[in-house]
Image: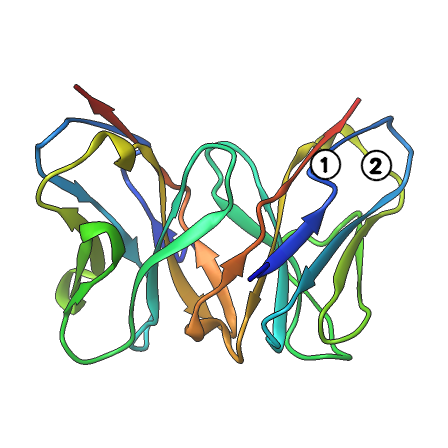
Amino acid sequence: AQSVTQPDIHITVSEGASLELRCNYSYGATPYLFWYVQSPGQGLQLLLKYFSGDTLVQGIKGFEAEFKRSQSSFNLRKPSVHWSDAAEYFCAVERGNKLVFGAGTILRVKS
Amino acid sequence: NAGVTQTPKFQVLKTGQSMTLQCAQDMNHNSMYWYRQDPGMGLRLIYYSASEGTTDKGEVPNGYNVSRLNKREFSLRLESAAPSQTSVYFCASSEMRARSGYTFGSGTRLTVV
């Protein structure tokens, strides 16, 4: 069963515009959720993670994500995108001491 | 801080050849993982090692073997490479459990011709 779904393969936003990347998970218990970013030719870097408590979590590089249990979602947001944010973004959920990743969303930033 | 180091960074193999991808971490992490990344499929787990001396299969283990040589090192071996194994391979480690988050290496781009 698919554990993590990222519905958008590609997203293009203008520099300075707001951004929301979607992530839905299918997992019964309270999940441990993550967002990672991958710049071209690089490994993955952790942006933020959610374990419990406040459903709005802050991460690095000005990103935040909101956990919504009722919608099984963990969407990533940024108020104002910079050209350097162009990358691929992966949502992940912990299952059995392993991370299961979504297929990724490629973000393009146009000037 | 080196973090997670993978070697080599690039490799081209002929079908049927064998090779070992090396991974080492210097963060005293207990758990280590091997993933492959293919376009449109995200990262898929090949094998993992929850702690020194243990290894387990992931989602796509066929055609691969692993060795957790010690706490620092976790290698991935392709015994007889196939074109379907052309991919980017990532090694990752976590402090205790996956829920603490991974630190990734920079990847090995493997092409099998």
Counting from the top left corner in percent of width and height, residue A5 is at: 33, 48
Counting from the top left corner in percent of width and height, residue B79 is at: 89, 46
**Where is residue A49, by image quadrant?**
bottom left
Task: Please name the residue that numbered disc 1 is placed on.
Answer: B85
Whole-angstrom CA distance, mark 2 to mark 1, is 7 Å
What's under tag 2, amino acid-wise? Ala
Label 2, residues with CA under 10 Å away: few <14, some 14-19, many ≥20 = many
**Where is residue B111, by image quadrant?**
top right
Please, which chain is the residue tagged with disc 2 on?
A: B
Whether B22 is drawn above or below B51: the answer is above
Please, which chain is the residue tagged with disc 1 on?
A: B
Whether A74 is drawn above or below B20: the answer is below
Pointers 2 and 1 in contact (CB under 8 A)? Answer: yes
Please state if A16 lies on the left or on the right of A41 as rendered.
left
Please state if B5 lies on the left or on the right of A70 as rendered.
right
Please state if A35 lies on the left or on the right of A96 as rendered.
left
